[in-house]
Amino acid sequence: MPLLERICRHTLTTPDAPAMILNDDVLSYLELDRRSDAIAEHLAQRGAGPETVVGLCDQPHPDWLAALLGILKAGAALLPLYTTYPAGRVQTMLADASVETVCVTGPPARNLADFTGRLLDCTQPLPPEHIRAS
């Protein structure tokens, strides 16, 4: 069963169950679904979708999973970007994949300093038009 389908099933059957626990932060399936929907909508309205690639930094944060799911829900391909990669390698990866948006869940890593596209901080509330009621 695909990942998005599994999470949707858990959201419907156990919405208040923890989907992710990181240190003291707990994210329920319902909250994960709402956050990832808002991120997907935000990305889609900025052109993300099939035939596009969105970067995702590997910063530990509960919203990292929401960003990952949001990218997939928008229909875009995911390019994982590790903070340990040298800046030159990251820039080459971003250019080769024609990445216009990178999702972050913390301050942008030093290896993104030369990135000229959009950075989406997925830890910040998105404008109300991007948040759908369930």
Image (cartoon, rainbow, N blue to C red):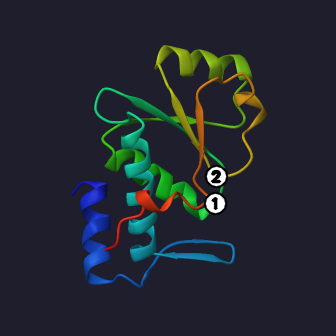
Is 7 displayed left or right of 90 in the figure?
left
Q: How far apart in space, not on screen, are marks 2 and 1 (Cα)? A: 6 Å
Return the x and y of residue 82 as percentages of the image width and height: 64, 37
Is 27 displayed left or right of 87 in the figure?
left
Return the x and y of residue 78 as percentages of the image width and height: 43, 37
Name above or below for residue 35 compared with residue 45. Answer: below
How packed is label 1: few (under 14 Cα within 10 Å), some, or many (20 or more)? some
Res 102 → quadrant = top right
Is 110 displayed left or right of 40 in the figure?
right
Residue located at (30% from left, 26% from top): 51
| Quarter of the image where the N terminus is located | bottom left
Asked if marks 2 and 1 touch (Cβ < 8 Å), the reply is yes
| Quarter of the image where the C terminus is located | bottom left
The label nearer to you, 2 versus 1, is 2
Res 8 → quadrant = bottom left
Callout 2, which amino acid? Thr
**Residue assigned mark 1:** 61
Viewer-closest of 81 and 74: 74
Callout 1, which amino acid? His
Q: How many marks?
A: 2
How packed is label 2: few (under 14 Cα within 10 Å), some, or many (20 or more)? many
**Residue assigned mark 2:** 105
Return the x and y of residue 11 as percentages of the image width and height: 32, 75
